[in-house]
Image (cartoon, rainbow, N blue to C red):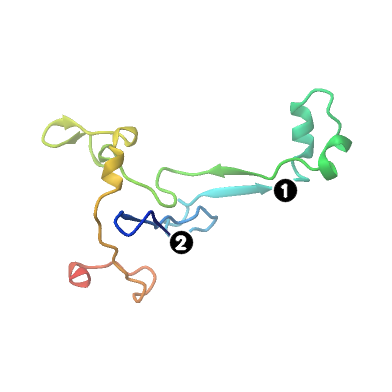
Amino acid sequence: MRILEENAMSRRIIDLSVPLENECPSNPKGYGPKIEYQSHKDTADTVISIFTGLKKSQLPDEEGWAMEHVKLTTHDGTHLDAPWHYSTKMDGNQRAITIDEVPLDWCFQPAVKLDFRHLPDGYVATADDVR
């Protein structure tokens, strides 16, 4: 968790994001991200194929770039669900907004962080737990 503060009078921003990982416990089984890690050695041939005339011996230590190929859904890791995710309509009969239309200030408002770490994994918090 990262906490950023400009000064005592400014608002505090707390980074609650969860990193993307294979076997991420926040996703239902089979719906998590799939990450294929490629080492510097794995990608050397790819790098030289991009640059005409480049030889592997010209790469530092004959290495390419460390890379990851990532397959994910819009629900992997930490994310924000737009109103469009739930319905085509919002605010009565207005077209629901998509994620690129969500005002950024929606994400920076006063909030309360609830700590449920004392509850077992998989537990579904109830209204009484929040109270």
Pick the residue in front: 47 or 123. 47
Position of residue 13 in the picture relative to residue 21 (left or right): left
Return the mark for residue 104.
none
Residue 37: x percent and y percent? Answer: 65, 49
Label 2's element? Answer: loop
Quadrant in which the N terminus appears? bottom left
Q: Earlier in the sequence, mark 1 or mark 2?
A: 2
Position of residue 68 in the picture relative to residue 98 (left or right): right
- Quadrant for residue 12, please give it: bottom left
Residue at numbered disc 1:
39
Asked if residue 76 is positioned above or below residue 43 in the image, the reply reads: below
- Outermost residue toward the bottom in this view: 118
Badge 2 amino acid = Pro
Inter-mark Cα distance, 1 to 2? 25 Å
Mark 2 residue crowding within 10 angstroms, few (<14) / some (14–19) / many (20+): few
Quadrant in which the C terminus appears? bottom left
Residue 30: x percent and y percent? Answer: 47, 53
Position of residue 86 in the picture relative to residue 50 (left or right): left
Mark 1 residue crowding within 10 angstroms, few (<14) / some (14–19) / many (20+): some
- Outermost residue toward the left in this view: 92
Residue at numbered disc 2:
25
Pick the residue in front: 9 or 48. 9
- Quadrant for residue 3, please give it: bottom left
